[in-house]
Amino acid sequence: MYSGGQPVVVLNQNTKREQGRKVQLGNVQAGKTIADVIRTCLGPRAMLKMLMDPMGGICMTNDGNAILREITVQHPAAKSLIEVARTQDEEVGDGTTSVIILAGEVLQISEPFLTQNMHPTVIISAYRQALEDMQDILKGQVSMEVDVTNRDDMLRIIKSCIGTKIISKWSDLACTIALDAVSTVSMEENGRREIDIKRYAKVEKIPGGAIEDSCVLRGVMLNKDVVHPKMKRKIINPRICLLDCNLEYKKGESQTNIELSKETDFARILELEEEYIRQICADVIAVKPDLVITEKGVSDLAQHFLLKAGISVLRRVRKSDNNRIARACGATVVNRTDELKEEDVGTECGLFEVRKIGDEYFSYIEECKDPKACTIVLRGAGKDFLMEVERNLQDAMNVARNVMVDGRLTPGGGATEMAVAWALNEKAKSITGVEQWPYRAVAKSLEVIPRTLIQNCGANTIRTITALRAKHATPGNTTWGIDGESGNIVDMKEFGIWEPFSVKAQVYKTAVETAILLLRIDDIVSGTKKQAGGGDVPQQAAASEGPEA
């Protein structure tokens, strides 16, 4: 800026500013680049990415969210796209790859409109209209109801989610595990269904053995052994008592000094400690438990008293594990031993057993009558492989949960996208004015999903997409899509690939809204740090000079 030939500096010297068309095209480019990274990870023929973190840890995965979580990017627009994958993962747990590919494509189709000087707000309003229509078409024309009590149908839905993962080779086992785990933790309360996978379905990974040895326990497993070697390691129908307090002498919060005048006083103090421990053990023994589990420590003396009473003890159990055990065996976690009552004892467990796997001891609390929490035990070749299997199972469980909460399905294999794209194209004919072009472009961008599926299995893209378009142009063919293994056109109704409605709806919403958000940006101001050394101003001084933008 010049005023009378003199430049007026408004922004700080060390801030970088980009504005106008350059920023918008830069954002589009960033979206395209992120989508290209993820593109090969879609479908059953998906490739894996191997990522190495700064600490030297290795992560092998084809889960969109896991990949983007590991890579570091510079561009602010790319960062917000990575955030999108995380939102999708937290919200519905599946569709993270699709959402990034679709968001990248919706951004890419806006590039020609920007270069033709169409105003971003015009493009955005067309996108908004298209998004609303997409949701209506999805709900009214493409989706169908499913009976969540039919086990075969549920397994088929989960199978389509697992088909694109490493675990697809053991898909029957994985589907059964996912469905059993979700059915176990599902609870009906005051007319609404609550399924908390994160808190009550714990995945325990034990390297070694074969994948086929993996299972869902009707109960909980802990990586713990009993505190005393002579305690019982196997109890049938145990009475379980859960504590959240120390079974040892309580130390004062602040530092205390005691002056002793007689030698007998010292002996008395030791006696008091012993009496206190004897008392808390007596409180516990009074309710006649067979197994005591506490989140805190257990002193040697307490171990001795409890051993004499024939009680097994597990100590320093995580709070989350304790809550899971409470849900599984019907016990209540008690904070003070003197408050223990008969109804706090859990009696619904069928077997407590400590088993040795490899070099480690694991405590199994299983065969519970009606557990509302469970543990999934995963066995497999190595740690990296088990990490990926766990990620795949989490996706499968989320799919099962989504269908149980909202029992609507949409056809998979790109069929939904083609059906919605065709319906949007038909609707675009009734839109007048310049907005119809961005509207049509959204319809075209949806084809990126079937197109990518075809590309990933090496089929002829143009010929297959044209044939699929022709199929969808005929009424009543909304379920035709791509077989991701061979690249042929198949009817998803017969092929049996279905996806939850909630995942699809979330993918569209998130992808289009992200594109809208990024198109809104026309100015990027970034504060850059000056390099120390040379004739530069020190960093604090540099940061304080002039008003910040």
Image: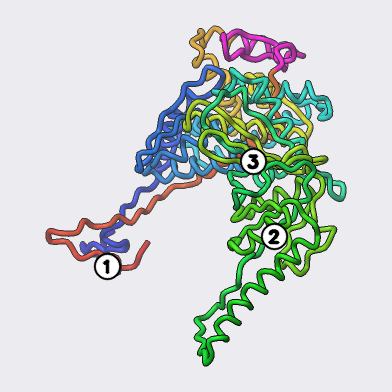
Q: Position of residue 410 (x, y in %)?
A: 72, 25
Residue drawn 61% across the image and 67% down it? 248
For the image, the number of numbered tags is: 3
Magenta segment range?
Answer: 467-496
- Residue under label 1: 540
Q: Which color scheme is applied?
A: rainbow
> Which of label 2 and label 1 is nearer to you?
2
Q: Residues within 10 Å of mark 1 (few under 14, many from 20)?
A: few
Residue 226, image x, y percentages: 62, 49
Q: What is the C-alpha distance between the residues marked 2 and 3?
A: 20 Å
SS at circle 3? strand
Query: Residue 249 in the image: x percent, y percent?
Result: 60, 71
Mark toward the start of the polypeptide (2 vs 1): 2
Q: Residue at x 41, y 50 (%)?
A: 523
In the structure shown, which secondary structural element does the residue marked by tag 1 occupy?
helix
Q: CA distance from mark 2 to mark 1?
A: 53 Å
Residue at left offset 21%, top offset 65%: 538
Tag 3: residue type? Val
Q: Which residue is mark 3?
A: 354
Tag 3: Cα neighbours inside 10 Å, few (<14), some, or many (≥20)?
Answer: many
Give yes or no for residue 220 being in the magenta stretch: no
The residue that label 2 is drawn on is: 243
Depth check: give the residue in front, 281 or 203: 281
